[in-house]
Image (tube, rainbow, N blue to C red):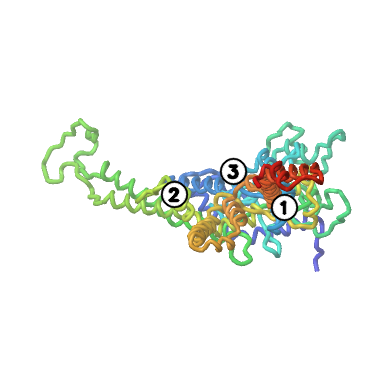
């Protein structure tokens, strides 16, 4: 039995070969999606050109590219807009999260996370990522920290990475192919600050290129990120991190590793549009759904162009006697022909009986199907609205929310595979940097919850706001007829539920303990006012009583009742 090489690089290369086999079936379709919709977004895993080819020869009508662009921007604005809140930290205990200190802590933590994301490149990467997910069914993003210790996301090019997932269905393995310049290789793997150069990390080829000054030549490199099975958790070294991140040069010796490093937690974000069973890669996505219509559209546009050309510049036949004689089809020119026979002049070779209007109508239908496949009609619903127009803002909002509900399953998957892992990663990064406020004691041992409050998520929750409004309207009518039924309505809870469904900032809605303090203070003020009013009413009687007591105390034994009543101002 042959001996198995157990070196780190050999194990990585064996697994890479298996991952490539797993992905082979998807690559032909990805290539077509790239060629017909968005050239340059896909590069073959074994391509020798680092920059890839951006051949647009198969695109005649750019409508699919425009639909893809609208959908990509719509996903960005609807799920992770940099201009509005799209996630917040919360807990599962509904009563505890209404407690003032807990509510303030969650709000401040969410603000810190948004600020942390705002100064990173995450939003640019997400915009590109949504484009890949719409086109190929998934994208891959790796979360790292840059020199300023800020979040820095890396976006591997589609086709240049291979994925695997854990038993729980979370992508936890990414092998990627990277093209690095000689200067980048030396700067990352060879140069040691204040310790010279360690050329054992790269091949002789790289060293020779560096010595010759060929700093911009490309070098094929691989990076493997996956859970580290064997490690010492108590060791702080990079080689004992929970997730390994190892680099090697394709042309180096089999035992040479350029870098052995790692991450404390899973840095891979790889949301999928839709998956089947245990598949790692998406089985369906808008690009795949639209591809047949995209091909038809390009073909029909060619037919239309050819038909118009045949009508404007028809093929003609002429007698051989006119060969090499002057002729012209330009306006205002004359071609002299001796009419000897019927066919002695120029005439059409054949008649093209093409209804351009019918072909244009079919092209328009194809375009609409492509827009529907990419949900561009939903994201542009207001602009493209036809028929009876909405009467007011409320009706307009209801229409848009009803349409966006079609994206419900996709929004839910993005929440679990993108928003939650990203928010978790940011929270722990802020915690490591001591950037979070001190948590209240009540949160000790409490699990964190990530809530999706993006525009698309709120469209799904809008149904609950309608039910609350209808219920409160019904309750108002009931209370008018049966006043005691007001005891069935918890107004505070209705406001909390309505605000949650709309994604209202928690600072706008007071916590339960603050509301209780306000009401207790108001009750005390009312009680004090009532006491003052009662005191003012009793004051005259008390004054008279005091005067009577004084008079009685000053009356001697000879005083008569009549005199006493007279002194009190009371007629006898």
Q: Secondary structure at mark 3?
A: loop
Q: Left or right: where does residue 44 sit relative to residue 256? A: left
Is 165 located above or below residue 436 in the figure?
below
Of residues 363 and 96, the one nearer the viewer is 96
Q: What crowding class fits label 1: few (fewer than 14 Cα within 10 Å), some (14-19), or many (20 or more)? A: some
Cα distance, mark 1 to mark 2? Answer: 36 Å
Q: Which mark is residue 396?
A: 2
Residue closest to the far front: 558
Q: Which mark is residue 84?
A: 3
The numbered mark, 1 or 2, whose residue comes first in the sequence reads: 1
Instruction: Report if residue 558 is visible in the image.
Output: yes
Q: Left or right: where does residue 67 sit relative to residue 436? A: left
Residue picked out by circle 1: 99
Instruction: Report if residue 203 is visible in the image.
Output: no
The number of numbered badges drawn on the structure is 3
Q: What crowding class fits label 3: few (fewer than 14 Cα within 10 Å), some (14-19), or many (20 or more)? A: some
Q: Position of residue 566 (x, y in %)?
A: 69, 42
Q: Left or right: where does residue 63 sit relative to residue 528? A: left
Q: Secondary structure at mark 2?
A: helix
Q: Secondary structure at mark 1?
A: loop
- Quadrant of the drawing holding the N terminus: bottom right
Cα distance, mark 2 to mark 3? Answer: 20 Å
The numbered mark, 3 or 1, whose residue comes first in the sequence reads: 3
Mark 2 vs mark 3, foreground winner is 2
Q: Which mark is residue 305?
A: none
Q: What crowding class fits label 2: few (fewer than 14 Cα within 10 Å), some (14-19), or many (20 or more)? A: some
Of residues 218 and 454, the one nearer the viewer is 454
């Amino acid at each position: 039995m042959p001996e198995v090489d157990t070196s780190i690089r050999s194990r990585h290369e064996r697994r890479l070969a298996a991952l490539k086999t797993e992905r082979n079936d998807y690559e032909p379709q990805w290539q077509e999606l790239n060629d017909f919709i968005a050239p340059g977004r896909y590069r073959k895993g074994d391509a020798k050109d680092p920059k890839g080819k951006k051949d647009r020869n198969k695109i005649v009508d750019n409508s699919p590219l425009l639909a893809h662009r609208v959908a990509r921007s719509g996903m960005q604005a609807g799920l992770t807009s940099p201009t509005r809140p799209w996630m917040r930290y919360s807990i599962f205990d509904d009563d505890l999260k209404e407690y003032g200190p807990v509510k303030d802590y969650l709000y401040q933590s969410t603000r810190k996370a948004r600020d942390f994301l705002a100064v990173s490149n995450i939003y640019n990467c997400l915009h590109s990522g949504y484009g890949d997910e719409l086109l190929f069914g998934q994208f891959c993003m790796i979360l790292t920290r840059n020199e300023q210790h800020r979040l820095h996301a890396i976006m591997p090019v589609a086709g240049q990475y291979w994925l695997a997932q854990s038993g729980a269905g979370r992508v936890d393995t990414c092998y990627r192919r990277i093209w690095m310049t000689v200067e980048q290789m030396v700067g990352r793997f060879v140069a040691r600050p204040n310790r010279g150069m360690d050329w054992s990390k790269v091949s002789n080829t790289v060293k020779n290129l560096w010595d010759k000054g060929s700093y911009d030549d490309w070098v094929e490199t691989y990076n493997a990120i996956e859970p580290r099975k064997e490690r010492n958790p108590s060791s702080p070294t990079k080689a004992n991190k929970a997730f390994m991140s190892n680099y090697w040069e394709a042309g180096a010796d089999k035992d040479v590793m350029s870098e052995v490093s790692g991450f404390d937690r899973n840095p891979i974000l790889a949301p999928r549009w839709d998956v089947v069973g245990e598949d790692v890669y998406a089985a369906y996505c808008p690009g795949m759904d639209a591809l047949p219509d995209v091909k038809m559209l390009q073909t029909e546009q060619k037919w239309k162009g050819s038909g118009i050309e045949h009508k404007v510049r028809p093929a003609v036949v002429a007698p051989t006697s006119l060969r090499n004689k002057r002729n012209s089809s330009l306006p205002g020119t004359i071609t002299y022909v001796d009419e000897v026979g019927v066919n002695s002049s120029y005439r059409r070779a054949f008649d093209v009986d093409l209804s351009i209007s019918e072909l244009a109508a079919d092209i328009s239908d194809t375009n609409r199907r492509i827009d529907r496949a990419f949900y561009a009609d939903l994201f542009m619903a207001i602009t493209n609205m036809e028929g009876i127009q909405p009467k007011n803002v409320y009706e307009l909002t209801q229409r848009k929310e009803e349409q966006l509900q079609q994206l419900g399953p996709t929004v839910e998957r993005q929440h679990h595979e993108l928003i939650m892992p990203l928010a978790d990663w940011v929270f722990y990064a802020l915690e490591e940097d001591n950037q979070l406020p001190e948590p209240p004691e009540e949160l000790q041992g409490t699990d964190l919850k990530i809530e999706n409050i993006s525009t698309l998520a709120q469209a799904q929750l809008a149904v609950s706001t309608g039910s609350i409004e209808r219920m409160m309207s019904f309750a108002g009518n009931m209370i008018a007829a049966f006043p005691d039924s007001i005891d069935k309505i918890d107004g505070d809870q209705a406001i909390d539920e309505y605000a949650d469904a709309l994604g209202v900032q928690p600072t706008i809605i007071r916590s339960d303990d603050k509301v209780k303090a306000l009401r207790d203070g108001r009750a005390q003020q009312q009680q004090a006012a009532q006491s003052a009013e009662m005191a003012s009413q009793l004051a005259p009687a008390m004054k008279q009583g005091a005067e009577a007591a004084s008079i009685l105390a000053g009356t001697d034994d000879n005083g008569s009742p009549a005199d006493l009543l007279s002194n009190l101002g009371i007629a006898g």
